[in-house]
Image (spheres, helix red, strand yellow):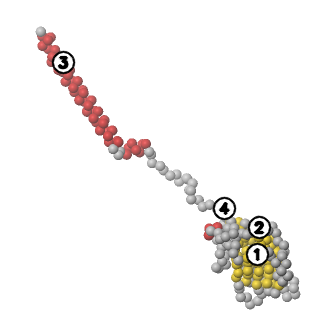
Amino acid sequence: MNRLTQSPPARRGVGRRRVGTLALAAGVLALGLAGCGGADDGGTAGRTASAPPVTTTAGTPSASVAARPTGSPRGGPAPTPATPSRLPTTPGEPAWSSEPRRVEHALPGTATVVAVRGAHNVAGGLEFDRLVIEFRDRVPGYDVRYVADVRSPGEGAVVPLRGQAFLELVLFPAAAHDDAGTSTLTTPRTGGGLPALVQYRLTGDYEGYVHFGLGVDDRVGFRVLELSDPARLVIDLAA
């Protein structure tokens, strides 16, 4: 009888301990769920770990490196950056074109041609062939244009020139000889053999007009410059 009357209190104590343990576990679970809810609700800790910030290295090559011109202004005006900026240009002249150019200069006398020469040049990333006409005193007027054929003045005979296109340069008032009729040129009357300027030659020296014929590899863009010290007329041909 004594065992039967003492056992119920023992069971009630065990029940209270189990209830307390369950309550404590429930509380821990609730705190865990609350913590998880904070990480998912816009928390930055989880996002920073999964997607770290991207940094830029100082040595990374830039994509905005300026490229060198890939072609010459053949047959038309060239973009401004493609024109060599160190070379002077005649006022009012386009930088590059295949259109005729004519400039007149009022001179007190006749300009004397003393040299003509050609060379291949590279400036500002642009390749071109340069024909230089040098004068004893000043640059005369000039007319330069593409023609179907270069013809000798007076006779009108076709001047044979190598090339696929032809430019004619006329200087006025100008002479390539002195009063005795002796040539004033200190260089050969003909030359060429360049990528664009295949051939050039003096084709006429008559009554204040000096003519040059240019054989070109194609109808390329050109520009005309006037230089000083010494006086020179320059024709650049895109190569």
Report the residue at 66% width, 77% height from top: 93
Cα separation between marks 1 and 3: 124 Å
Of tags 1 and 2, which is closer to the observer?
1
Using a 10 Å C-alpha cutoff, classify the residue at mark 2 as few (fewer than 14 neighbours), some (14 to 19) or many (20 or more).
some
Q: Report helix, strand or loop for mark 3.
A: helix
Identify residue type, mark 1.
Answer: Val
Of tags 2 and 3, which is closer to the observer?
2
Q: Quadrant of the N terminus?
A: top left
Q: Report helix, strand or loop for mark 1.
A: strand
Residue 11 has which mark?
A: 3
Identify residue type, mark 2.
Answer: Asp
**Mark with earlier residue (3, 4):** 3
Judging by the rendered image, the residue that carries numbered circle 2 is: 217
Judging by the rendered image, the residue that carries numbered circle 4 is: 70
Of tags 4 and 2, which is closer to the observer?
2
Callout 1–callout 3 Cβ contact below 8 Å = no
Report the residue at 62% width, 70% height from top: 80
Using a 10 Å C-alpha cutoff, classify the residue at mark 1 as few (fewer than 14 neighbours), some (14 to 19) or many (20 or more).
some
Report the residue at 87% width, 83% height from top: 182
**Mark with earlier residue (1, 2):** 1
x, y (%) of residue 17?
21, 24
Cα separation between marks 4 and 2: 19 Å
Callout 2–callout 3 Cβ contact below 8 Å = no
Of tags 3 and 4, which is closer to the observer?
4
Is 207 placed above or below 48 here?
below
**Mark with earlier residue (1, 3):** 3
Of tags 1 and 3, which is closer to the observer?
1
**Mark with earlier residue (2, 3):** 3
Residue 147 has which mark?
A: 1
